[in-house]
Amino acid sequence: MARWQPGARDRLVLAAVDLFADQGYDATTVAQIAERAGVTKSTFFRHFPDKRELLVAGQETLCRLLVEGITTAPESATPLEAVAAGLERASNAMGPLNRELAPRLKAAIAASTELQERDALKTVGLAKAMSDALKTRGVADPIAHLAAELGVLAFKQGYATWTALEQDEAGLAPHVAAALKDLRTATTALG
């Protein structure tokens, strides 16, 4: 097996998502994932503690990017403007591999209760990261929480729009920004 080839982490994620979609999460073993990715089991475990973690492989990076964008937003930024800065930074980091994985990942998650639970925890983690970053900026707890939840919803909606397109030259960021704008408009109707 070609353990020295670059991209083992990405190959493991792709292999896992394909296997989860083809034969189900429960029926897929770490050995099968490693074999399909062209690496050893020990290489798998150098990158991931278990197969569940494959689906949240980028969560740490995503949280870090969201927080960096929020914390570096201008001091004068409103909470939603700071969230928008975080969403832009995170969205700009997502590329063709993320878009390619989306339909297979969605199918794998839909077919497994365990993966649905893990995906829900990922969403909670993203909201917490944004909320904590906003609180660090001095935003009051309820406002920080609401802005973070709107940010997560905008990210999900923008991601769904982006991945549903036949072709997309603009990337994820404009779709997330449009979703956040729509949500901001919708909140005024709550009245």
Image (cartoon, grey):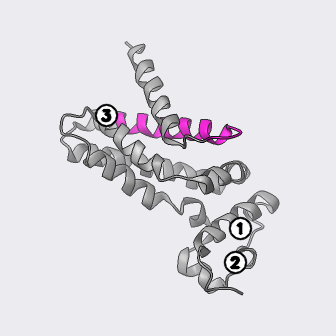
Q: Amino acid at mark 3?
A: Glu
Image-based side of 167 in relation to 152, left or right: right
Alpha carbon distance from label 3 to label 2 = 42 Å
Q: Amino acid at mark 1?
A: Ala
Q: Which residue is mark 1?
A: 15
Find residue 150 and report its image quarter: top left
Magenta highlight on residue 55: no
The residue that appears at 25% across and 32% down in the rendered structure is 78
Find residue 40 and report its image quarter: bottom right
- Tell which of 91 and 150 is nearer to you: 91
Q: Which residues make up the magenta segment?
A: 147-168
Look at the picture and state if 82 lies above or below 49: above
Q: Tell me the tag on residue 34.
A: 2
Q: Which residue is mark 3?
A: 81
Residue 96 spot, x, y in % from top left? 61, 53
Q: Earlier in the sequence, mark 3 or mark 2?
A: 2
The residue that appears at 70% across and 48% down in the rendered structure is 103
Residue 12 spot, x, y in % from top left? 65, 71
The residue that appears at 60% across and 83% down in the rendered structure is 43
- Tell which of 109 and 9 is nearer to you: 9
Q: Amino acid at mark 2?
A: Ala
Residue 164 spot, x, y in % from top left? 67, 38
Would you say the magenta stretch is mainly helix, strand or loop?
Answer: helix
Tag 1 and tag 2, C-beta contact below 8 Å: yes
Look at the picture and state if 12 lies above or below 158: below
Q: Earlier in the sequence, mark 1 or mark 2?
A: 1
In the picture, the quarter occupied by the C terminus is top left
Under circle 3, the secondary element is helix
Alpha carbon distance from label 3 to label 1 = 38 Å
- Tell which of 191 and 18 is nearer to you: 18
